[in-house]
Image: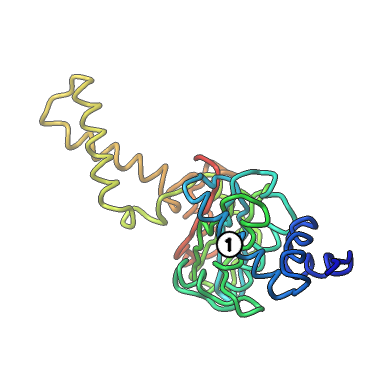
Amino acid sequence: MAVTMADISHLRKMSGAGMMDCKKALEEANGDFDKAMEIIRKKGQAVAAKRSDREASEGCVLATEKNGFAAVVALKCETDFVAKNADFVALTQEILDIAMAQKPASKEDLLATAMADGRSIQEHITDRSGITGEKMELGAYEFVNGELTVSYIHPGNKLATVVAFNQADVEHQMARDIAMQVAAMNPVSVRPEEVPQNIIDQELEIAKDKARQAGKPENLLDRIAQGALQKYYKENTLLQQEFVKDAKLTIEQYLHSANKELTVVAFKRVTLNVD
């Protein structure tokens, strides 16, 4: 049967696929929209399988917060051209909206969550892969909970952060400052006692090796290494970092300038850039 422009436009609206892909699918399906949708979806599965070993290093990172919960998602693709496409950004936003509504416990749970049409987020990502011809994947899903949460998206949608506080009455600019601090300075943890042990061991060993190479006595290496570790904490744990807007203050001091009990309970940082 002949395929009309109205049919093609209708399928394009349903699927998000290109005009020529919709035309070919409708012709193959003899005008049956359900069969045409299945053809488009199978194409997405084929593209996803074919490009599974490709690197998806571009994409879109979005974040938001509501009622003490904040989430950040990263939908990845192969090229910046696709990453900036309005439909790709819209799909990322849809995934974030679902994460905010459902609050899944993991990335795997989020991927299995149904979208408006009853099909999973993973299926929709696969569909989009077929439409663009690029590998696509959900690169990250992170979240925090607290009395108050804040999110920050760096211009360009390649980097976003979410931060949770122990009190609800944090001034908006202060909360945003902390989210931007996390974006700019990439701390490894909120406080020193939360730094993973493997990182501590690594930093101590690096410091000892440097001291040995500098000819320091063996009996002083542990003391030197501990001093280097304290320096590492100041540079890499959020509360001890210098505030980027005022180097005279640590982040903890900045928070305490508003309330002595105010602190950060958690943060997450997701980026597609190489730090």
Colouring used for the render: rainbow
- For the residue pair 168 and 38, the one nearer the viewer reads as 38
Q: Nearer the viewer, residue 211 or 259?
A: 211
* Mark 1 residue element: helix
The percent position of residue 217, horizontal first and vertical second, equals 13, 25
Asked if residue 20 shows in the view, the reply is yes
For image coordinates 19% across by 37% down, the residue present is 223
Which residue is pictured at 54% across the width and 55% down the height?
48
Which amino acid type corresponds to the residue marked 1 in the rendered image? Thr
Residue 66 in the image, given as x and y percentages of width and height: 62, 73
* Point 78% across, 68% down: residue: 11
**Where is mark 1, residue-wise?**
126
Image vertical order of residue 159 relative to residue 104, above or below = above
| Total marks in image | 1
- Report which quarter residue 12 is drawn in: bottom right
Taking 19 as reference, is 66 above or below it?
A: below
Q: Position of residue 146 (x, y in %)?
A: 50, 72
Measured as percent of width and height from the top left, residue 59 is found at 61, 50
Q: Quadrant of residue 24?
A: bottom right
Residue 178 showing in the rendered view? no
Left or right position of 101 against 208: right
Q: Is residue 14 left or right of residue 275?
A: right
